[in-house]
Image (spheres, rainbow, N blue to C red):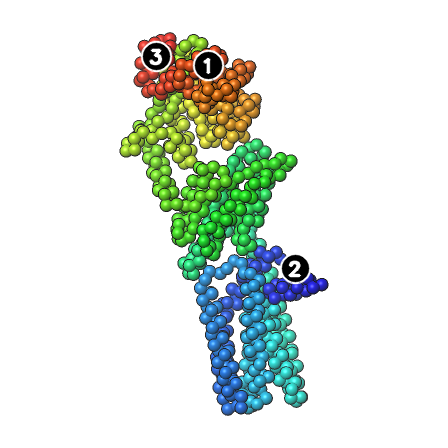
Amino acid sequence: MRTYLRSYFATLFAGDLAAFGAPPTDEALAGHIRAEQVSLVLGYSFGIMLANACNALVLAVALWQSADWAFALVWAAAVSSAALFFGLQARASRRIAKPQFVSRRTMYRLVRNALALGTAWGVVPVAFFANASSGAQLVITCLCAGMLAGGAFAFSTIPIAAIAFTGPIFIGTAICLGRDGDFIYLLMAVLVLVYGSVLLRGVFLNAFEFRRRIIAQHEAERTVRQDPLTHLPNRVAFNEALNGALNRLSRSGEEFAVLLLDLDRFKEINDRYGHPAGDEFLVQVAARLQRCTRAAEHVARIGGDEFALIMSNLTRPEDALAIAERFVAAFAEPFPIDGFEITGAISLGIVLAPRDGTTSHDLLKHVDIALYRAKKSGSGTICFFEAGDDQSARDRRALQRDLEHAIEADQLFLVYQPFLDIRKGRVTGFEALLRWQHPTRGLIPPTVFIPIAEESGLIHQLGEWVIRRACAMLSRWPDDIRVAVNFSAVQFQNVSILQTIVEALDAANVAPNRLEIEITESMLISKYGSAPAILNGLLELGLTVALDDFGTGFSSLTYLRKLPFSRIKIDQSFIRDMLTQPDCAAIVKSVIGLAQDLQIGVVAEGVETADQLEYLRQTSCDEVQGYLIGRPMSASEISALLDHDPQHSVHAA
């Protein structure tokens, strides 16, 4: 019983109409309703407090000839000062952006202040009416009636505050009228009772209607501002919250942080377990993230696998870091979905306002840069924005702009590294490697510009250029020479890639089996869902497909079983250490034996010594590639080599 009463009174004095029979609401919605109630009260407060001060002065003047004039003067000075103080405070609060959430404690203070002011006016009829002149009594009556009406109007959406303000005035009036015993005063008491009943009924009706309207508005806005899958705020709500935080920053200097989160390997989860499992994963992620935040803060889902949080009222950067670390820790346990335990991870970028920007454009740009650096550093990484990040981002954008014109400016070219058939001792083909000769920066390595091309979508244009150039070069070489072209995961999203290959082969009049497509295992991990159809399409065209860097991932054997490959390439890390590390030697032998059993060709990458070549010959490896066989060479060097030696033999040195 005690617990129930405590809960009831807490609800009552928080201004929640559930205490008067309205349906209960969750704390988030209740806080939003309180915010609207307080905002409305603040809108009236300055005018009403000014009226309180004027009324107090009028009362002091009316009682100037009374025996209680000294007490009245002190009372008037106290009420006027308090009213002006609260009025100016309310006016200052109105200049700050309207809060989206108000705590119960704030409402408690509001009810307490209403009770204090109502009590001050409730003293008036008790203390001054009996000794006042008939004119002063009329003034007291009018002032009390006006304060009752004004209080009911000011707190018309908060019944408990209206009761707290008008209750003492009613009680004071009742004491005053009942003390004399005059029949006329009894009639006045009845009128006051009727008047008060009408006022309070109006307050309750207005409060319930106001609550219903706010809830309906909240529900309507939620459909626009809420992510339908996770029920978190969406990008629209996030942008509004960010603008609100920026307004508070400019008006009151309230600092804040923006955290941007990105799920790692989410596409892999979608492709491996299906989109329904991916949706359930997002729902569980949203729940875990929200549990890590404070009550008034909400994580927003602003993209497919991107989430963001605005951390308001920031006192030190360590507070933002603490929440970020809680986000990372939330992924320590796997997610149970459809009988599977799915492991997830996130990367986070953080910006601090105003340190890292004072506009939404700057903050979002900088937090995206910080997230980019975090993802580059690996799963579970948290990165604050640093000034050097912006310079790196500007460099990437500059390179992207230059890369857009590199093809037209004839800055791109191909070099070719040979494959050697160990048994026949002859060159069987070349791997085409893309290079960029920048006019001012010199030779830019592919490890720098290929990621930029993938991020910007330029990889499709570059890929088509490489295929057409490689096929054109093939037309100049003997018919038994093939060329291998590397594909990235992004290129497999290009639905027209097969048509491009067909056109390039037709234009060069080259047989399809002379063109080989190399893909890496990392590509399969990121785009496994569409890989089988595309790879089968390549094979139907007559191309060969090679799995590059074999053995560096965790599912190589799965891919060999499910996907059609013509050749696998053993990663150079195994070749480099196979003569000194028994485990590497065992892996190399096993892969070669496996390829032979599956009737798949096998190429050893990174062969640099004669001993390595001899070992591979003894283990029956099909082909080798590396600096011992030949470094990447230009098209003219290859033509000279093939013209000089029609048998394509190479003598490794």
Residues tagged 2 and 1 counted as in contact (Cβ below 8 A): no
- Looking at the image, the residue that sits furthest to the right is 1
- Looking at the image, the residue that sits furthest to the left is 440
Q: Position of residue 44 (x, y in %)?
A: 50, 70
Front residue (pair 471, 415): 415
Front residue (pair 147, 582): 582
Front residue (pair 197, 170): 170
Inspect this view and state whether residue 148 appears.
no
The answer to which quarter of the image holds residue 133 is: bottom right
Residues tagged 1 and 3 counted as in contact (Cβ below 8 A): no
555 relative position to 445: left or right: right
Rounded to the nearest whole Å, what is the CA distance between mark 1 and mark 3?
25 Å
Crowding near the residue tagged with mark 1, few <14, some 14–19, many ≥20 C-alpha atoms within 10 Å: many
First of labels 1, 3 by sequence position: 1
Instruction: Name the residue carrying label 3.
Output: 642
Rounded to the nearest whole Å, what is the CA distance between mark 2 and mark 3?
87 Å
- Does dot 1 land on a helix, a strand or a loop? helix
166 relative position to 378: left or right: right
First of labels 2, 1 by sequence position: 2
First of labels 2, 3 by sequence position: 2
Inspect this view and state whether residue 432 appears.
yes
Instruction: Name the residue carrying label 2.
Output: 23
Q: Position of residue 307 (x, y in %)?
A: 51, 45
Instruction: Name the residue carrying label 1.
Output: 616
Amino acid type, callout 2: Pro
Amino acid type, callout 1: Leu
Crowding near the residue tagged with mark 3, few <14, some 14–19, many ≥20 C-alpha atoms within 10 Å: some
